[in-house]
Amino acid sequence: MARLRIGTRGSQLALWQANHIASLLRERGHEIEITIIKTTGDKITDVALANVGTKGMFIKEIEEALADNRVDLAVHSMKDLPTQLSPVFEIAAIPVREDPRDVFCSVLYGAIDQLPEKARVGTSSLRRQAQLKAIRPDLTIFSLRGNVDTRLRKLEDGEYGAIILAAAGLSRLGKRELIRETISIDTMCPAAGQGSLAVEIRAGDSATAEHLTFLDNASARATTTCERALLNRLGGGCQVPIGALAEVRGLRLQLTGVVARPDGTKILREVREGTDPDQLGEVVGQSLLKRGADVILREVYGLTVTAPQQP
């Protein structure tokens, strides 16, 4: 069997993900080494993610290690990957997907509608901020950075009345105690690829690709491909107010796409079905653009909107 080197970020969640893939490979008899690599996104911790504006900020240094043959594969959160990979890389496997939805976490309150007026809510995402503001414009949204433990500690210390996180990360780390509500897709459409992992390799590395084939899940690949096609059509990254969720419905896919003004005053939503993941993502993205998504996104890219404020 092969000796494989995995590149990953050093956060608790990233290490869980890398170790998860490592354990599955070890079960196949492979010898695994994990290399921790600090990325640009890890180094910038005092600025709201929406204001950083660096595409691939959580993968750049890892891809450099991959290109330099210092690691053989990289394990990423799918939503951290740009929609267009460099041609020197490829996604060799997309494992079974975790719950893609967002969750409402709180010590004092049982659901979003139970929050008092002007309650402080923490989130690092313009997408979450926008959809939250659409249903509760009175809430005060603050930027929330740091790993999962840091975010939960700030919640427990009373800095926020609630925080919004991804269900997948909390489930993977076994930290579901403060989840009070799993937010419906109709209320908060997730980020493209949320809940999915991407195993990236050098393009043309057929030997490593063959070792990873068993990890690839057809449903996860179809849904994330569809969501990323929509995101690509809109020209967006993971830090813009775009939601995308594809779901398998029999032999078809149903794609929900959302583009929102960060202040929640305008939400565009499109739901369509199809059989071709790339084509469906393209069609929904084009429809949203025709309905005014281009205007909203120009505002965001032009920095004419306000990101979540620092507490």
Image (tube, helix red, strand yellow):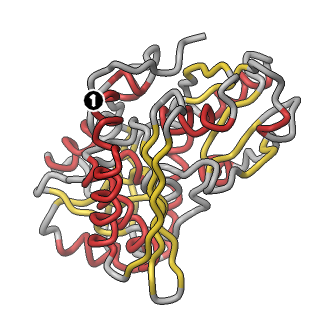
Please indicate, yes or no, whether residue 22 appears anywhere in the rendered image: no
Task: Using residue 263 as the reference point, say whether residue 69 is left or right of it.
Answer: left
Tell me the quarter of the image containing the C terminus: top right
Tell me the quarter of the image containing the N terminus: bottom left
Residue 151's spot in the image, x, y percent? 65, 28
Please indicate, yes or no, whether residue 285 appears anywhere in the rendered image: yes
Task: Using residue 189 as the reference point, say whether residue 218 is left or right of it.
Answer: left
Residue receiving disc 1: 54
Q: Please determine whether, in this image, residue 189 is positioned above or below residue 282.
A: above
Outermost residue to the top: 311
Outermost residue to the bottom: 251
Task: Using residue 90 as the reference point, say whether residue 266 is left or right of it.
Answer: right
Residue 91's spot in the image, x, y percent? 28, 63
What residue is drawn where x is 43% and y is 38%? 241
Task: Give 212 or 130, whichever is nearer the viewer.
Answer: 130
Task: Give 264 or 185, whichever is nearer the viewer.
Answer: 264
Q: Secondary structure at mark 1?
A: loop
Residue 28's spot in the image, x, y percent? 45, 77
Q: Please determine whether, in this image, residue 298 is positioned above or below residue 230.
A: above
* Callout 1 crowding tier (Cα within 10 Å): few <14, some 14–19, many ≥20: some
- Amino acid, disc 1: Thr
